[in-house]
Image: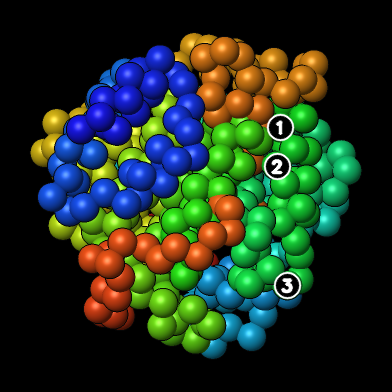
Amino acid sequence: MDLLDTLTAKGLRGETPTREEALAVLATTDDELLDVVAAAGRVRRRWFGRRVKLNYLVNLKSGLCPEDCSYCSQRLGSKAEILKYTWLKPDQAADAARAGVSGGAKRVCLVASGRGPTDRDIDRVTDTIAAIKGADPAVEICACLGLLSDNQAERLKAAGADAYNHNLNTSEGTYGDIATTHTYADRVDTVRKAHGAGLSACSGLIAGMGETDADLVDVVFALRELGSDSVPVNFLIPFEGTPLAKEWNLTPQRCLRILAMVRFVCPDVEVRIAGGREVHLRSMQPLGLHIANSIFLGDYLTSEGQAGQADLDMIKDAGFEVEGAGEATLPRHRADVTAQAGSCGAAPGAAVSPCGTGGGCGPCGGHGDEPAAEEDQNDEPRNGLVRVRRRGAGTELAPNA
Ligand code: SF4
């Protein structure tokens, strides 16, 4: 297939495909699916070998958010029966983090609901980072606290944060359809603030919200332009009690095509299968590992994932290995770009850096109207697979890790 040969060759060189080529990946048929996975897998192995990076979510503050992101169970007016609690104390967060690190995670993602942190919130997170790194300095910390004000990124960097997550989620053209209390531009601004402060930018998307193929391609190209070092690909978890509860638009095949498109557009960037992995990829999760080089271990912010041990078993059974604390995630040229970003403020984008330049709440393009491929549409609702998190942070029960 000429398309896949072209995409593989470009990906192995670290080059970005054209927009048309990215759209063509999303339009491939189920008969072509294994060829698509194999091609994306070659690119994945070129830059990341057979390593899988494990990330662990600690929800520092859950629910009660004043923002109206329609996909989110923590949103204003959400009727989802999620855990609701205010800030965990540093030692409570460190206990949860320790469980994830013991399970094999090298990055801990500290997430708080809300529009953005106050300076007092930055103090709290600073204390939490100290508690986690005091016990294990090798743990990578990614903060995800919403929209940042001036100097907050610098304060997080000084506190020892390694990365900041703020997802673009969808294309600029459709952003107003999923949230009205902040803008796409607000999100871009926060990613730039984080990157400018020398934090590794983690910024991704949510698929399955009713977007077009063109929207997906637009947001992935925007992430490439922003220079996200890691791209979490969330698959919408249609929580009962949220406006998108009926949006069951994804099939496992569709999810794999989306992951492959992201891999081809961002060949040397950490591509993470984020929220919705179990709900939408289901028994096809191991194929996703051939494309993505990163997943979350255990549970998500407000929903439960499969058992942490099942994640580890899946990685081993599929012939992959958990990335160790001493191993670099990114290829050397990208790690250099990350290191330089804070010191010179320049937008990274070296010749071999197709995801170019610089990272809202965690797991939670064009503006054409072409529908998704017919066979991808209308997966049956799998409400039974959406399990509200009832263990770990904010509860008396042990975390899943
Ligand atoms: S995604 Fe973040 S900002 Fe939006 S409603 Fe959820 S917690 Fe609030």
Who's the residue at 67% across and 80% down the image? 76
Q: CB atoms at circles 3 and 1 under 8 Å apart?
A: no
Who's the residue at 79% across and 22% down the image? 345
Residue 97 visible from this viewpoint:
no
How crowded pointer 2 is (Cα within 10 Å; few <14, some 14-19, many 20+) is rated as many
Q: Position of residue 251 (x, y in %)?
A: 26, 64
Residue pointed to by mark 2: 191
59 displayed left or right of 339: left
Q: Position of residue 226 (x, y in %)?
A: 65, 35
Q: CB atoms at circles 2 and 1 under 8 Å apart?
A: yes
Disc with the residue nearer the chain's start (3 vs 1): 3
Residue 106 occupies quadrant:
top left
Q: Amino acid at mark 1?
A: His
- In front of the other: 400 or 70: 70
Image quarter of the N terminus: top left
Could you tell me which secondary element the residue under label 1 belongs to? Answer: helix
Q: Position of residue 398 (x, y in %)?
A: 37, 60
- In front of the other: 379 or 279: 379
Residue pointed to by mark 1: 195
| Label 3 to label 1: alpha-carbon separation | 25 Å
Who's the residue at 17% across and 53% down the image? 30
Residue pointed to by mark 3: 180
Who's the residue at 32% across and 66% down the image? 250
